[in-house]
Each structure stands twice: as C-alpha cells, then as structure tokens.
Image: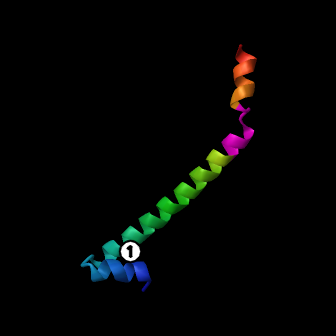
C-alpha cells in the first residue's frame, strides 16, 4: 500500500475511498500538467503584447 493510501486509512478513510481519492488526485495532477503545457504553448505562439497593440493602432 502506498504512503498516501496509508495516511488516508490511518486517518479513518475506508480503503476503497482512499484508493478513489488517490486516483482522483493523480487525474487532477495530470490535468494540471497538461493545462500548464497548453498555457506555455499558447504563450510561445501568441504575438507579444506590444506587437499586437501597435498592429491594431
């Protein structure tokens, strides 16, 4: 059993719930990682703010 699962069980969380919590935490971490990648990709492909401001003036 993983350390996180042990922590949850030691706090009184049923084992099936602890496993579900860990799965959801892992999914959240992965979604946040993907979101950060999309943000970085969007920032690198967007024109600089000063260039877009002068182009619209």
Which residue lies at the image location 38% right of the left edge and 79% below the top edge? 5
Residue 1: in magenta span? no
> Quick one: quadrant of the C terminus?
top right
Left or right, 13 with respect to 24, comes to: left
Q: Residue furthest left?
A: 12
On screen, 48 above or below 6? Answer: above
- Classify residue 27 as left or right of residue 52: left
In the image as oriented, which residue stretches furthest toward the bottom?
A: 1
Residue plotted at (69% across, 21% down): 53
The residue at 57%/50% (across/down) is 35
| Mark 1, secondary structure of its residue | helix
Q: Is 43 inside the magenta-drawn segment? A: yes
Q: Report whether residue 21 is seen.
A: yes
Give the dominant element type of the magenta stretch: helix, strand or loop.
helix
Q: Which residues are magenta?
A: 41-48
Quadrant where the N terminus sits is bottom left
In the image, is 8 to the left or to the right of 29? left
Residue on which disc 1 sits:
19
x and y percentages locating residue 26 in the rendered image: 48, 66
Of 1 and 55, which appears nearest the observer?
55
Quick one: which residue is furthest to the top in this view? 57
Q: Quadrant of residue 46?
A: top right
Specify whether residue 15 is in view.
no
Q: Quadrant of residue 44?
A: top right
Write down the quadrant of residue 12 in the picture. bottom left
- Give how far across and how far down residue 17 sits, in percent: 31, 72
Residue 11 position (above or below residue 55): below
């Amino acid at each position: 059993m993983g350390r996180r699962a042990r922590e949850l069980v030691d706090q009184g969380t049923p084992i099936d719930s602890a496993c579900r919590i860990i799965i959801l935490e892992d999914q959240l971490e992965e979604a946040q990682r993907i979101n950060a990648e999309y943000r970085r990709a969007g920032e690198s492909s967007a024109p600089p703010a000063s260039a877009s401001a002068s182009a619209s003036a």
